[in-house]
Amino acid sequence: MIDASKTLSINNMIVPIGEERNLLEVARRAGIDIPTFCYHSELSIYGACRLCLVDVEGRGIVAACSTVPEPGMIVKTHTEEIRKMRKVAIELILANHDQNCTLCARNTNCRLQTLARQLGVDTVRFKRTFERRPVDRSSLSLVRDPNKCILCGDCVRACDEIQGVGVLGFAGRGAKSSVVPAFGKNIADVECVNCGLCATVCPVGALVPRDDVDDVWKEVNDPRKTLVVQIAPAVRVALSEMFGGQSGTIEVGRIIAAAKAIGFDQVYDTSFAADMTVVEEATEFIERKKKGERLPQFTSCCPAWIKYAEQFLGDFLPNLSSCRSPQQMFGSIAKKLLPEKLGIKREDIVVVAVMPCTAKKFECKQSKFRRDGQWDVDYVLTTQELARMIEEAGIRFNELQPQSFDMPFGFKTGAGIIFGASGGVTEAVLRYAVEQLKGVKLDSFEFHEVRGDENIREADFNLDGIVLRLCVVHGLANARKVADMIRKGEKQYDLIEVMACPMGCVGGAGQPVANDWEVRRNRAEGLYKADKMLQLHKAQDNHLLMEMYDKHLKGGVGGHDAHELLHTSYQNRKRIHGLTMSVSDAGNEAGLHISVCVGTSCFVRGSQALLKQIVDYITDNGLSHVVSVDATFCTENCDRGPTVCVGDKLIFKATIDEVTKTMNEQLAGVRI
Amino acid sequence: MSETASRKFSRVLDILEKNSNDPARLIPILQQVQDDYRYLPEEVLTFIATSLDLPPAHVYGVATFYAHFTLVPKGKHILKLCDGTACHVRGSEHILSALHSRLKLSAAKHTTDDMLFTVECVSCLGACGLAPVLVVDDRVYSKVTPEAAVEIVDKIVAEEGGVPPKAASISTPKKEDAIV
């Protein structure tokens, strides 16, 4: 029975009102797709694009996304007036748009293209106002093309609301509006963490993952090179979507066959390296837990999270696991062991990683992952890029005969597979750590407590008196919430898994374009299915991995070689490049220079008040002509802030007394 | 110089404090900071963003949205010349070229090298009966002629302790016009 007091009418159809926030959601549930650019179920409601207009009797034309459904409403979604208005809206966008569809990365899966077709827009009646602006190719992960931007603001809200970064914003107004990073800088010069969520939500081609396909083809076609490719877990449950498959279908056999057909010589599984990550990270965790040191331990496999922490959570850097991500562990091991195994020179090996991720492109080019003049991982391709290579090579994906991974780096357990879903790393670590801490073999391997799709999930495990308090987070804004709660002492955890993308790597920005909750959920389920279908589920049962440790890594798990090859360290990062602010300029006479860090961490620790005290001291003591003061935005020592540099001396956890004392000492030195 | 710079910076701190570091008060904060600096320097905006826990891109967005804010340094004295219909018809163009010539400015360069003057064209000041109108800082001058405009500039230069201009400079634009 439908309760009449909880229904409304859309196009003469009686529709129940449930929990929906607005008319757009009510209509969608009723099977009517109202066109929109700026509405996203995961983001705040913006109401900018004016496409979702509907006629509500007695109210006139309103935007469906920002109208609360009320019982008895009579709604029409495609009156003549609305049809005309929508067409005009599309025409106006097109008048100020690149319109070069064939050359666009989003050709055939662009919402502007689709809506123009669906709404029958066949001519643009407005004067073309388009002015070409430079494309920002500064980032290793993303390309921003302002010529295609339709100003829907989806990227602005996604970056701010889900990732808590806020790299992009609207600048200017009216006809001069644009979406740009702060001060019109390039993406590479601001706080972008390379997660690519902006590209995931972008309805057009204004933000797209960087394309490295050409470079990889060149290597494939170079007869001197041996191409080694690693395939990440989340790729196998998404790639077939590009060839008409259902999301979540496990197509690993065909992906391997396709990679071989393209010309990759060795096809391995990143999950092998993920098993390695599990034993390293769990060993590290058990040690910290036993000593009660540097807890909570944060996971470190997500490169967007790492950059975020390096920029915004400097005080938590010692808490990050020192383990490299599976991608980088793989590269490091492959470049070390494969030359001997395959009888080829190290410099002739090209390691390509196929990832669901755009941030991995940035990660692989960090100088710390370069050894003897070569990158551990030479190229990262996204799931989308591999699909394009398959298409370009003329391979009929759906007709391929499945093949299997090469050995030994193709062998994995289910632990290394579930890495691709949020909660998977935690579960994989538990499968190892619980056995280690309890000292008994477990019959079961599933920990459903840490699965699910809530943004912040908690689970406690009591192992004969040892309590493990776990937290699983996705979305970096949520990671920041958790960090704040820990700082305030409201929460205590032992292990925290952080993934930047919604639902983890399955929702990565490198995945095929339809990337909503349902698709992500299907992909995650696909990974758990793949885990079930394997015979082994715990990383410690990966005998080929253990054999590799025995034969090649001195000290075994967590030992000397493992530390050199599989672990890393972190650095504080400046958020914005090239900024210092002259606070007090003594001109040429300056005998002494003082820099006070006013970056986020130091600011939290009171650097602003300190700066004021320093300036007051200088003014009060008549030192303005000899001492100049700068405010800098990061000295990259966030865990020891506030930092003040007096002359050549760097003071951590600075106080006014210490600064003035050092200042006077240095001034005495200058005068002599 | 140093006194000014440090005093200015502590004013930024005072302004933030007075507005209780409240992100909702971003616009008044920017207004007050611009009053001090005469523009909004990039590093000060970043500092304000950090202090208010807002993304710098957001603060940049607000600063570029309102015409009142400027991200490039402006002169100490701001000359707003009306070029709305009424003022235009009554010859505001000639006033502009006289000011440009006197101050060595152009359509692309609005501020003098000594940072004393900025000349801006505005669309309508709503005082058409007084056309052509020139607003210097907060003072409105009506029925301005090119000569009167240059005189106003000269007076300010003299007050600022600068070199008084030669009388010839007033007629310079006319001569050039004649040549063209």
Image (cartoon, rainbow, N blue to C red):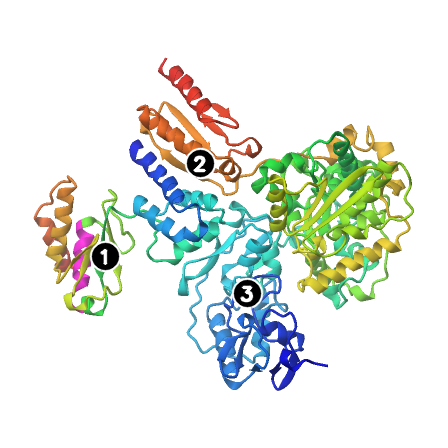
Query: Disc 1 and disc 2: Cα gap in Å?
Result: 37 Å
| Residue B31 location (% of width, % of height) | 34, 50
Q: Is residue B95 magenta?
A: yes
Image x and y of residue B30, in percent = 37, 49
Instruction: Work out whether residue A266 can be spotted.
Output: no
Discs 1 and 2 share one subunit: no
Mark 1 vs mark 2, foreground winner is 2
Left or right placement of residue A529 versus residue B59 in this view: right
From which residue to which does the magenta span run?
A: B89-102
Q: Residue at x 84, y 36 (%)?
A: A437
Amino acid type at mark 2: Gln
Rounded to the nearest angstrom, the CA distance separating label 1 from label 3 is 40 Å
Question: What residue would you read off at disc 1?
Answer: B80
Q: Which residue is mark 2?
A: A608
Using a 10 Å C-alpha cutoff, classify the residue at mark 3 as few (fewer than 14 neighbours), some (14 to 19) or many (20 or more).
some
Q: Determine which residue is flagged by label 3.
A: A45
Quadrant housing the N terminus of chain A: bottom right
The first of marks 2 and 3 along the sequence is 3
Residue A363 appears left or right of A616? right
Q: Horizontally, is A578 left or right of A488 in the view?
A: left
Residue A591, quarter of the rendered image: top left
On whether residue A159 falls in the magenta region, the answer is: no
User: Mark 1, chain letter?
Assistant: B
Identify which residue, B156 or A225, lies in the foreground. Answer: B156
